[in-house]
Amino acid sequence: MGFLQNFGIPPYRTIPAARRALTRRERGYGGGMDSASYIALEERAGAHNYHPLPVVIAEAEGAWVTDVEGRRYLDFLSAYSALNFGHRHPRLTEVAHRQLDRLTLTSRAIHSDQLGPFCAELTDLVGLERALPMNSGAEAVESAIKTARAWGYRHKGVPDGEAVILVAHQNFHGRTTTIISFSDDPVARNDFGPYTPGFQAIAYGDLDELAAALENPHVVAFLVEPIQGEAGIIVPPDGYLRSVAQMCRDANVLFIADEIQSGLGRTGHTLACDAEGVTPDVLLLGKALGGGIVPISAVASRSDVLGVLRPGEHGSTFGGNPLALAIAREVIALLATGEYQQRSAELGAHMLQRLTHEAPGTVREVRGRGLWAGVEVHEQFAPVRPRCEAALDLGVIVKDTHATTMRLAPPLTISREDLDHGIDVVLKVLG
Ligand SMILES: Cc1ncc(COP(=O)(O)O)c(C=O)c1O
């Protein structure tokens, strides 16, 4: 019996990890805990604002991740498209290391040698004129809302406090109090009021509703996802985006495309809007812009739109930090070659073709563009979550969105063999 046990205190390691402070080893300096202990610890010490799949990842490379027990899984989720270039893409980690050794943060109180080049390179890539880097996707959306309102008052002549922003039903743009104010998902909204006014929701894909809403001269913008991601990879009718752009132009209203999930190669194009040859007035990017390494988002726009912001009106301490900008510039350089968009288009067509032709009877519909698909099961086979857990048991990570849709978003760097292996597993668990 040891010294502590004389006082009725059990040896440290025999106390379940979930109920005690961690040793240095357990804090990640050499590992030591199993998956169940990590999950129990998270349950005890973390907020329960997610319902993750029961797997604890310790390492990753390319399209593969490894859990704390050493089991490998094929990543068919890519952190909701934040890992478009796979885990730890060598060009991105190299730039990150190099920048870590030079300069990481200045704040916007002074200039850095990364901001100007980032803005120029990003606007070149997407065909716009000004850019504003922020951190999270939601922050880019918030920035666009503020900018559109100010543009409405200062350029369009909308009376102060009267600006209206149109949004689509079933939208997902993030989690801030203003953004959830125009969500129609009760889980995202309930108990988080009072809600921010100034938004009007219209049916997604419906040009008649848009036309009617645009009659209101106080409308300053239409904020919309070119493909609705969280809603279940909902692709609008052909020509929708082109008509939206034209109708907004005619009404002197800003077309704000939220490409935080659909952008940067995911759909087989640099932007989902490219499929219809459309450039929005305001473009929102995030997720993959940080190469799966750091959070960075951006608003890009015509010159007159972001041009309304004056010093002191908007900002963020870490927004446009040199570390994130250096990585984002390398992401932009990767995309400038067109290679990833092409891979996404080719492999995506193969994935969609297989899912469509080999779908078992449980499947109601397969939707998608590029390497991004939503497989919706008939109501009687919902929820789809147990099938995602079955895929996990077979070594493939896929996630449900709402009760009936399984979403697939493998990294754009995935090999065709790995892709086929993942599709085999998905089809098996759907059967
Ligand atoms: C279309 C879209 N906009 C905005 C966001 C919010 O991004 P973040 O989670 O980085 O705040 C998301 C996140 O899923 C998204 O899919």
Image: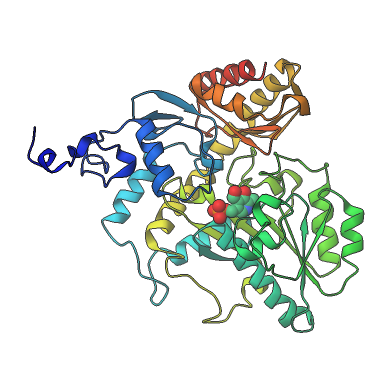
Quarter holding the N terminus is top left
Residue 118 pos. (x, y %): 47, 60
Residue 346 pos. (x, y %): 63, 28
Quarter of image, res 11 = top left
At a point 40% along the width and 43% down the height, the residue shown is 42
At a point 62% along the width and 71% down the height, the residue shown is 306
- In the image, residue 212 sits, relative to residue 3, either above or below, namely below
At a point 78% along the width and 78% down the height, the residue shown is 162
The total number of labels drawn is: 0
Quarter of image, res 374 = top right
- In the image, residue 13 sits, relative to residue 279, either above or below, namely above
Residue 392 pos. (x, y %): 51, 25
The reply to whether residue 186 is visible in this rendering is yes
The reply to whether residue 260 is visible in this rendering is no
Q: 73 or 183: which is nearer to us?
A: 183
Q: 325 or 141: which is nearer to us?
A: 141
Horizontal side of 278 relative to 102 (left or right) equals right
Quarter of image, res 33 = top left
Check the image and tell me how it is coloured.
rainbow
- In the image, residue 134 sits, relative to residue 387, either above or below, namely below
Horizontal side of 242 relative to 22 (left or right) equals right
At a point 50% along the width and 47% down the height, the residue shown is 48
- In the image, residue 89 sits, relative to residue 136, either above or below, namely above
Horizontal side of 321 relative to 10 (left or right) equals right
Residue 195 pos. (x, y %): 69, 67
Quarter holding the C terminus is top right
Horizontal side of 217 relative to 155 (left or right) equals right
